Image: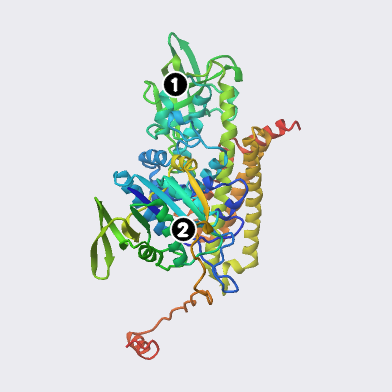
Amino acid sequence: MKVLVPVKRVIDSNVKARVKPDQSGVDLANVKMAMNPFCEIAVEEAVRLKEKGIVSEIVVVSIGPAQAQETIRTALAMGGDRGLLVQSDVDLEPLAVAKVLKAVADEEQPGLILMGKQAIDGDNNAVGQMLSALLGWPQATFASKIEISGSSAKVTREVDGGLQTLDVALPAVITADLRLNEPRYASLPNIMKAKKKDLAVKAVGDYGVDIAPRLTVLKVAEPPKRAGGIKVETADDMVAKLKTEAGVL
Amino acid sequence: MNAKHPASGSPIDFDHRYQGPHYTDGHRAWRASLRRFVEAEIIPHVEDWEEAGEFPRELYVKAAAVGLIGMGYPAEYGGTPVEDPFYSIVTSEELARIGAGGINASLMVHSIGLPPVLAIGSDAMKARIAPQVLSGAKIHALAITEPSGGSDVANLKTRAVRDGEDYVVNGSKMFITGGMRADFYTVAVRTGGEGAGGVSLLLIERDRPGFTRTPLKKQGWWSSDTAALFFDDVRVPAENLIGAENQGFAGIMRNFNKERIGMAAGAIAAARVCFEDALSWARERQTFGKRLADHQVIRHKFAEMARHIAASQAWLEQCAFRTMAGETPVADLSLLKVQATLAMEYCAREAMQILGGAGYMRGCRVERIYREVRVNAIGGGSEEIMRDLAARQLGI
């Protein structure tokens, strides 16, 4: 079975994000970028499925600037077989991303699309769901366990109050949650091998889908700074403050 | 280290600099992997290992699995060839972030022990030794320095005398990194007359009768197993000779240039770790009603540290570029090492002043790096030897 794994290049999770002075977005100039952590988990799961003999080929796709090739190479170093960059110099909205991915899926005909539940930059948590609707495939989101047998997948999801298990027919879209696995880091030999793997580059225009923006960002602002705490002398003082100032009692 | 990167965007930032012309996606990918390896497998244990005076042997196997041990060595022996010396720089830098140079020194000790075997050893010897070392199964140390002298290689005293099919070795070696646990030792011995022309390299296995070792306690590098080695009528088969008899001196010297650029990269990175930890402290710490980082006297310390680091780094990358182009700029490499360890010394001092009492307590990277300044400034060619070598090379 062929699996398609979409990955996104995002600001590194260890970098402190700064808002641009004009509040139009996050300042990405000279900021370290990395693969979205949820995408990494999806890649890892695909590699494990391949190691178990369930998956025969892992195709890694990214939609983004030319530098996203670096992100694809990282996925190839983890164990992906070949890559595809759909180059777009503007940031696409989730619906546009889902449309492009549908076009890629139509071409590639994978048996499974395995992707992160959301990207840590926009936190939209939308592409997987939209993609499954566009393809008319079943979806299983927030997967914390995936078991594939024959033409269906049993997916465990973490939901409020416990675990839900879904049985979905393949092909399907499955999105990865944080606890699905612990992604490996690529070894140097695998980084070197990944340089030689096939990485095709196409333009987003090649797919002929409507990517016109439908959303307008009004402003991006830092969260309000937290005020410092205060010390109270007695328990009575605390109760009084909870009643009068905090208004929680 | 898991905190949000404190120096993001500044010219001394480990990540920001990788936008430079020498660094490719491959370097960035290797650095990202290595950082995760170090943060998962090494950093959580550093303080325990430092106090214990060694780290678990299994770390060699783990380091081999991630590609660290085999980096730059031929694939036929289990290594991973790389295109340029910037992979080594990235490696030195990421290992320096541990802030415990003893771990790097012992873990990577094969990088001084093995190259003479690969450069001038027989094919049979390479095939026997290299795969075991590059897989992390065996440790390979280098033994040149003696109680009577270090850099004066041409006058070493340990003697190997031919007796039938064997050499019989007598003498001792001093300050040998990895010396307690190594399985293979590349040992410089005198097989001929006085001077450089009488020196050979001999591969000696740890279990040869008459070969003993004792541990040495040090100012820094506590997790490194440094030893004195003693050879008392140790019989070594003649096929263990590395290269031709009395031709060992060139093999030793060739090794030094690579060692120096690696040490320079590590020392500059250690300086940057000092900067990073001091900066994160100075931004948090409040004194006299403002951040420590807002006091002019402290701000100037950071500016000076950044100046030392940036200048040293630029020279390092220039030297790496020149070696990549096939040059061996001995004078530059020697003086680069001096520059790098002086930058480390300066930054360790200034960072310690900024950290104050907190920096003097054990369990902090700057405290350890402060105790590792001298081993960098003395080991692998002291500042004095380096300046003398450079002056001779420059024809002064």
In this orientation, which residue lies closer to the viewer: A76 or B386? A76
Task: Compute the Cα span from label 2 to label 1.
Answer: 48 Å
Q: Chain of mark 2?
A: A
The image position of residue A14, as x and y in percent, is 47, 60
Labelled disc at residue B22:
none
Label 1 element class: helix
Tell which residue pokes out farthest to the right in this image: B396
Q: Is residue B390 above or below residue B314?
A: above
* Viewer can see residue B191: yes
On the rendered structure, is B267 left or right of B105?
right
The image position of residue B180, as x and y in percent, is 41, 33
Number of disc labels = 2
Q: What residue is pinned by disc 2?
A: A8
Q: Are marks 2 and 1 in contact (CB under 8 Å)?
A: no
Q: Quadrant of the C terminus of chain B?
A: top right
The type of residue carrying mark 1 is Met
Tell which residue pokes out farthest to the top in this image: B164
Foreground disc of the pair 2, 1 = 2
In this orientation, which residue lies closer to the viewer: A61 or B160? A61
On the rendered structure, is B174 left or right of A169?
right
Q: What residue is pinned by disc 1?
A: B125
Please tell me which residue is depicted at 52% across the width and 43% down the height of the picture.
B92
Q: Chain of mark 1?
A: B
In this orientation, which residue lies closer to the viewer: B86 or A161? A161
The type of residue carrying mark 2 is Lys
The image position of residue A36, as x and y in percent, is 44, 58
Tell which residue pokes out farthest to the bottom in this image: A244
Rendered image coloring scheme: rainbow
* Viewer can see residue A43: no
Q: Alpha-carbon neighbours of circle 1 within 10 Å: few (<14), some, or many (≥20)?
A: some
On the rendered structure, is B350 left or right of B68?
right
